[in-house]
């Protein structure tokens, strides 16, 4: 499995950070290897803007992504990796 991510942020204020974020996912099964490479095995890459707000010990980050690989692919039933993806995380500094 290959699952790297890359991003960059800019601190507007200590409470607000904006940035660009991306990630990729590809699976490479070997036991047994597939007879052909399918869309669901990837690799598929996504990129988009991200925002993080800081409320002291509590923080919240959200990113909205668009698939940048195979953008014209129309999903079939059961396939992963739709055209859009949204990620949201809430954290607490201990």
Image: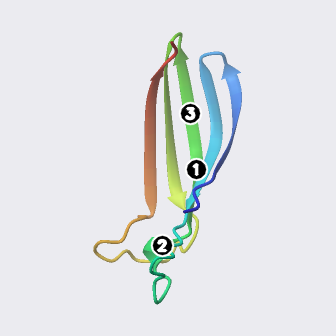
The residue depicted at 50 percent of the width and 77 percent of the height is 72
Apparent side of residue 2 relative to residue 83 in the rendered image (left or right)? right
Say if mark 1 contacts mark 2, CB within 8 Å.
Answer: no
- For disc 1, the marked residue is 48
User: Which residue in the rendered view is the most extreme toward the front?
Assistant: 31
Task: Identify whether 69 is placed above or below 14.
Answer: below
Q: Position of residue 18 (x, y in %)?
A: 63, 33
Query: What distance separates the C-alpha of mark 1 from that of mark 3?
Result: 10 Å
User: Which residue in the rendered view is the most extreme toward the bottom?
Assistant: 35
Task: Identify whether 18 is placed above or below 58.
Answer: below
Please give the label number shown on residue 51: 3
Q: Where is residue 5 in the image (x, y as percent from the top left)?
A: 62, 50
The residue depicted at 56 percent of the width and 33 percent of the height is 51
Q: Which of marks 1 and 2 is nearer the N terminus?
A: 2
Rendering colour mode: rainbow
**For numbered disc 2, what is the local secondary structure?**
helix
Where on the picture, by quarter, is residue 52?
A: top right
Q: How crowded is mark 2: few (under 14 residues within 10 Å), some or many (20 or more)?
A: some
Query: What distance separates the C-alpha of mark 1 from that of mark 2?
Result: 22 Å
Q: Where is residue 60 in the image (x, y as percent from the top left)?
A: 48, 26
Q: Earlier in the sequence, mark 2 or mark 3?
A: 2
User: Which residue in the rendered view is the most extreme toward the top?
Assistant: 56
Q: How crowded is mark 3: few (under 14 residues within 10 Å), some or many (20 or more)?
A: some
**For numbered disc 3, what is the local secondary structure?**
strand
The residue depicted at 40 percent of the width and 77 percent of the height is 74
Please give the label number shown on residue 41: 2
Tell me the mark number nearer the camera, choosing from 2 and 3.
Answer: 2
The quadrant in which the N terminus is found is: bottom right
The one nearer the camera, 18 or 24, is: 24
The one nearer the camera, 51 or 58, is: 58
């Amino acid at each position: 499995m290959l699952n790297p991510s890359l991003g960059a942020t800019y601190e507007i204020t200590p409470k607000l950070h904006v940035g660009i974020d991306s990630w990729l996912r590809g699976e490479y099964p070997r036991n047994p290897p597939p007879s052909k490479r399918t869309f669901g095995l990837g690799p598929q890459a996504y990129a988009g803007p991200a925002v993080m707000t800081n409320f002291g010990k509590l923080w919240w980050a959200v990113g909205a992504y668009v698939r940048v690989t195979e953008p014209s692919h129309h999903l079939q039933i059961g396939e992963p990796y739709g055209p859009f993806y949204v990620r949201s995380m809430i954290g607490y500094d201990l």
